[in-house]
Image (spheres, rainbow, N blue to C red):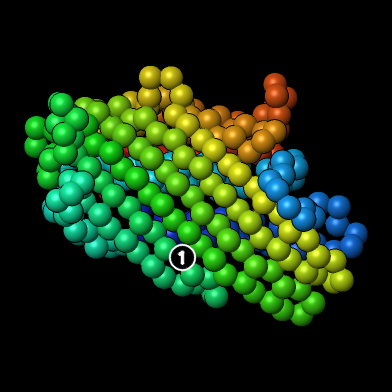
């Protein structure tokens, strides 16, 4: 499957909702479903089927947010932002925004901040003359659902940090990392269980080079223990992601993403 990453910012919330709903539904098994997690406490490792299911969701959500850096590289006040309402905060010297909403019984909140930094690392209000930019996102989603013979509840959160240098030039150099946590419980056809999962990711090497009029090069790695997913950008309009357990490639958790690179983040 090769999903296209286009018009990313308006779709980011729906993608994260889809991810969370997919995670929750994966837990709604039956007595004969060995893939249904049953974890009374603590964080557990992904089994292969569960990791395969989430691989593409994780890749898409991270790549979506990375492209936002291109959107904000030339300033916040010039943008007609369709998700966040931004406000300048003098101390600590950054733009802050938030969003809250609901979708089929689930409530989501997003808190973000964006900071432009001069050559000495001091904050400034706009990008003119800035040497770097930091972008931070925190999100939480909670909810529950019940139906004929089943019910589940979900608590989902993620944290993403990005930094970019090269503002005022034709190419951004992007670094970043983040975490995702999922806790849920379910009951279905007489069986019940709960599960906790942790995911982490980071940009590899010197960073991802992202020309404002082209496609990125570089790589990042997502860890869903014991599995890893490596995402490679090769300067074309297609990113490749490969899931592995150690050195063994998991084909069902691997694939490509079509990128619309002409105007990244727009």
Give the tally of numbered discs.
Answer: 1
Check disc 1 and report its element: helix, strand or loop. Answer: strand
Pinpoint residue 163: horizontal percent, then vertical percent: 31, 34
- Residue drawn at point x = 53 percent, y = 30 percent: 221
Residue extending furthest toward the front: 91
In this view, the residue in front, 259 or 52, is 52
Residue 4 shows up from this direction: no
- The quarter of the image holding the N terminus is top right
Q: Is 22 above or below relative to 60?
A: below
State which quadrant residue 68 falls in.
top left
- Residue drawn at point x = 46 percent, y = 24 percent: 204
What residue is pinned by disc 1? Answer: 108
Residue extending furthest toward the left: 128
- State left or right for residue 69 relative to residue 234: left
Q: Is 146 above or below relative to 208?
A: below
Local packing at callout 1 (Cα closer than 10 Å; few below 14, some 14-19, many 20+) is many
Pinpoint residue 198: horizontal percent, then vertical percent: 61, 44
In this view, the residue in front, 202 or 252, is 202
- Residue drawn at point x = 59 percent, y = 35 percent: 223
Pinpoint residue 202: horizontal percent, then vertical percent: 47, 32
- Residue drawn at point x = 51 percent, y = 62 percent: 141
Residue extending furthest toward the bottom: 148
In this view, the residue in front, 26 or 154, is 154
Residue 202 shows up from this direction: yes
- State left or right for residue 55 relative to residue 27: left
Pinpoint residue 84: horizontal percent, then vertical percent: 28, 61
Residue extending furthest toward the right: 32
- State left or right for residue 18 relative to residue 259: right
State which quadrant residue 225 falls in.
top right
């Amino acid at each position: 499957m090769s999903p296209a990453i286009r018009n990313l910012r308006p779709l980011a919330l729906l993608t994260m909702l889809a991810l969370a709903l997919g995670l929750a539904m994966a837990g709604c098994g039956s007595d004969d479903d060995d893939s249904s997690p049953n974890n009374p406490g603590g964080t557990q490792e992904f089994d292969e089927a569960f990791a395969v299911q989430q691989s593409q969701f994780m890749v898409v959500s991270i790549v979506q947010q990375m492209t936002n850096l291109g959107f904000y590289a030339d300033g916040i006040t010039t943008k007609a932002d369709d998700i966040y309402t931004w406000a300048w905060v003098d101390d600590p010297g950054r733009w802050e925004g938030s969003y809250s909403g609901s979708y089929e019984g689930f409530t989501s909140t997003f808190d973000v901040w964006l900071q432009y930094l001069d050559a000495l690392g001091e904050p400034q209000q706009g990008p003119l003359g800035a040497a770097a930019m930091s972008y931070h996102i925190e999100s939480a989603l909670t909810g529950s659902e019940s139906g004929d013979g089943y019910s589940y509840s979900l608590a989902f959160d993620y944290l993403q940090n990005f930094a970019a240098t090269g503002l005022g030039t034709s190419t951004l150099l992007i670094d970043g990392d983040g975490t995702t946590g999922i806790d849920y419980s379910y009951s279905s056809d007489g069986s019940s269980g709960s599960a906790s999962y942790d995911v982490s990711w980071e940009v590899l090497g010197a960073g991802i080079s992202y020309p404002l009029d082209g496609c990125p090069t570089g790589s990042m790695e997502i860890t869903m223990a014991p599995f890893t997913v490596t995402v490679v950008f090769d300067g074309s309009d297609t990113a490749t992601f490969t899931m592995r357990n150690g050195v063994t490639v998991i084909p069902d958790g691997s694939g490509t993403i079509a990128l619309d690179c002409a105007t990244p983040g727009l």
